[in-house]
């Protein structure tokens, strides 16, 4: 199931608002940004002109469906997190989030310093 699509299970509501944005992965956020950019370009372009979108190699890698394996997805963990969010008991580990943000920033900076 893609983020933002209606759930297949009856009685399960789709989450919106800040909590929904918080639960999205970087790849999903990048995909949404690419879709918004394409939509904006299509809306602002003249009707007779075709538009194209250029995606950086890093964005293409993040969006690439072939880079993920079934082992990257744990359905039981998703159910547990969804249940905790619905009950209001989900706690964000701020230290883990900060560690990941720093690691991602360091990776980006190392790629940029190498000219890539």
Image (cartoon, rainbow, N blue to C red):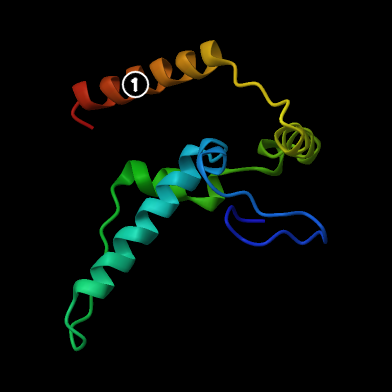
Foreground residue among 87 and 106: 87
| Residue at image coords 56%, 38% | 19
Q: Is residue 63 left or right of residue 112?
A: right
Residue 103 image point, x, y percent: 42, 17
Left/right placement of residue 30 relative to residue 88 reads left
- Label 1 Cα neighbours within 10 Å, binned few <14 / some 14-19 / many ≥20: few
Please indicate whether residue 26 sits to the left or right of residue 52 in the image: right
Residue farthest bottom in this picture: 48
Residue 43 position, x and y percent, is 26, 74
Kindly state the secondary structure of the residue where label 1 is placed.
helix
Q: Position of residue 58 (x, y in %)?
A: 34, 41
* Image quadrant in which the C terminus is located: top left
In the rendered view, would you say 116 is above or below 44? above
Q: Is residue 101 above or below residue 20?
A: above
- At horizontal 52% and vertical 45% (from top left) the residue drawn is 17
Residue at numbered disc 1: 105
Residue placed furthest toward the front? 88
The quarter holding residue 90 reads top right
Instruction: Pick whichever, 89 or 44, lies toward us.
Output: 89
Query: Which residue: 33% across, 67% down?
Result: 39
Q: Which of these two is toward me, 48 or 113?
A: 48
Left or right of 46 in this view: 111: right
Residue 4 falls in image quadrant: bottom right
Q: Quadrant of the N terminus?
A: bottom right
State whether residue 91 is above or below residue 84: above
Could you say where residue 63 lies in the image, as x and y percent from the top left?
A: 45, 49
């Amino acid at each position: 199931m893609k983020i933002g699509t209606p759930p297949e299970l009856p009685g399960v509501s789709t989450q919106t608002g800040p909590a929904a944005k918080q639960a999205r992965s970087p790849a999903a956020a990048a995909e949404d940004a690419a879709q918004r950019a394409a939509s904006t370009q299509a809306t602002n372009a003249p009707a007779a002109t075709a538009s194209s979108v250029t995606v950086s190699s890093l964005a293409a890698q993040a969006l690439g469906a072939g880079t993920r394996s079934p082992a990257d997805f744990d359905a039981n963990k998703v159910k547990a997190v969804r249940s905790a969010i619905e009950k209001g008991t989900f706690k964000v580990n701020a230290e883990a989030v900060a560690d990941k943000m720093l690691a991602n920033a360091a990776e980006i900076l190392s790629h940029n310093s190498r000219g890539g």
